[in-house]
Amino acid sequence: MLATGTTALSVTRIASATARPERVLGLHFFNPVHSMKLVEVVRTVLTDGRVAEDAAEFARDLGKTPVAAGDRAGFVVNGLLFAYLNQAAAMFESRYASREDIDAAMRLGCGLPMGPLALLDLIGVDTARTVLEAMYAQSHDRLHAPAPILGQLAAAGLLGRKSGRGFYTYAAPGSSHPTAEPASASAAPAGRVPGREVRSVGVCGSGTMATGIAEVFAKAGYPVVLAARSQEKADRAKAALAASLDRSVAKGRMTGPDRDAALGRVAPTGLLSDLDQVDLVVEAVAEDLAVKRELFTALDKICRPGAVLATTTSSLPVIECATATTRPQDVVGLHFFNPAPAMKLVEVVSTVLTGEEVTATALEVCARVRKHPVECGDRAGFIVNALLFPYLNDAVRMLEEHYATVDDIDTAMKLGCGYPMGPFELLDVVGLDVSLTIERVLHQEFREPGLAPAPLLEHLVAAGCLGRKTGRGFRDHARR
């Protein structure tokens, strides 16, 4: 058997240079080979099935985990990974967010071991560009066309860690330690105006997210008014918050007196009018624009002048909430991640009308509640979802094309990239209906054909297979 370790070249073309193409295949080991468990076993249309089986068994004998793949650029892992990296490079190039915020968002929001721009520097900007060019040559998908910044960096010799500079600057060629300079071209400007003083907080909603956000603020020392549609719902939300605090005490994460103090700071109410004196209101109600706009119109009439109004939406335009008020300059996005008490990331989303001191207030509040804020503008998906969901959609397309199985794709991304969950595990956890909604929003915003939701995802949602919450999604959870 003759094997190639190529990551981007056509195995079929390599096989055609021999007189025995049926015995040629790809064995794509991952770097560093001695520690990475994954091997992609790549067969061409001419590869003998027994040869592929023998190669997979050989990989197992080496203590590796083989996954089967066909001969197309990128195979499984790079086919999903590099499109995501390319989008991150394009996001940075457009100055939508700083390199630090893009990387922090994906590490803290998705639990990834490295941010995409730092990973591009590790892989090598020139290598990434070569892989993307090969993918584009096969797919003709514009999302695979290398972002111009990759070509510019490569032409300048800024190839990443190996040259000492890429998206980041390193202490020396080959070093893994980035230096502080030069500053990111899109970093936040120095001399930011100070934010407004926040002494008390209101949280609107009674679900998991609202309860979690109320817990975050209460533990940080803020008095919190937890407003729901009825007193009964507000009381249930506080009871859920108390249960969460009890679990923290049981795990040794906080003391009993600290729990009691935090719980004592939360005042549940069924009346929005009780928010009239708070300095910051965080809305965490249903992800429905009409519902949110109605709430913001009501808050506009109730809240005192100068109060900051924030929405936790993950996919709706913040500007639509802002324009439901007479003070759009006071409205900002504060996108907490679920579960809010555990997740460190908050996306601070400013609209074209958001006042500078309101953005500053949001950043200062995040620091006080010990969250890591990242700044971005008001466009679909913000940072995390704009990078995450096209990757998930690509995985679904890969499945519906019968290129690889659910288990092989999930295994490949976990072992090949160190992701905490494979794409189908994550889709089933998030909910296929929620995922489809976000993908539709992204497609509607950017009108990019490659962002159109995969038909298989739409069919599963139509069939009521929504993931873990219904017992069936890409996997049958009822049988597990």
Image (cartoon, helix red, strand yellow):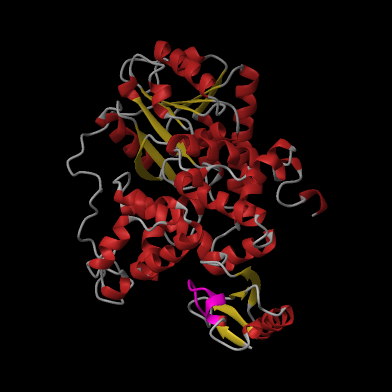
Residue 447 placed where, x, y %? 45, 38
Residue visible at 45% across and 62% down in the picture? 137
Q: Quadrant of residue 308?
A: top left
For this orientation, the residue located farthest to the left is 191
Describe residue 187's horizontal placement relative to residue 134 as left or right: left
**Image x and y of residue 170, in percent:** 26, 69
Residue 167 seen from this side: no
Camera sees residue 122: yes
- Residue 22's image quarter? bottom right
Residue 359's x, y, as percent?
Answer: 30, 33
Q: Residue at x 32, y 44 (%)?
A: 96
Q: Which residue appears at 65% of the width and 54% of the height?
A: 425
Q: Is residue 342 magenta?
A: no
Query: In the rendered structure, which segment of residues is drawn in magenta?
Result: 5-14
Above or below 32: residue 224: above
The quarter of the rendered structure image containing the N terminus is: bottom right
Looking at the figure, which quarter contains the C terminus?
Answer: bottom right
11 inside magenta stretch: yes
Q: Nearer the viewer, residue 47 or 473?
A: 47
Q: Nearer the viewer, residue 247 or 297?
A: 297
Q: Residue furthest right?
A: 479
Q: Position of residue 277 (x, y in %)?
A: 39, 17
Q: Is residue 398 above or below residue 67?
A: above
Main SS category, magenta section: loop
Answer above or below: position of 256 versus 104. above
The answer to whether residue 442 is left or right of residue 398 is left
User: Which of the 4 image quadrants contains residue 21?
Assistant: bottom right
Looking at this view, is 283 or 39 the one in front? 39
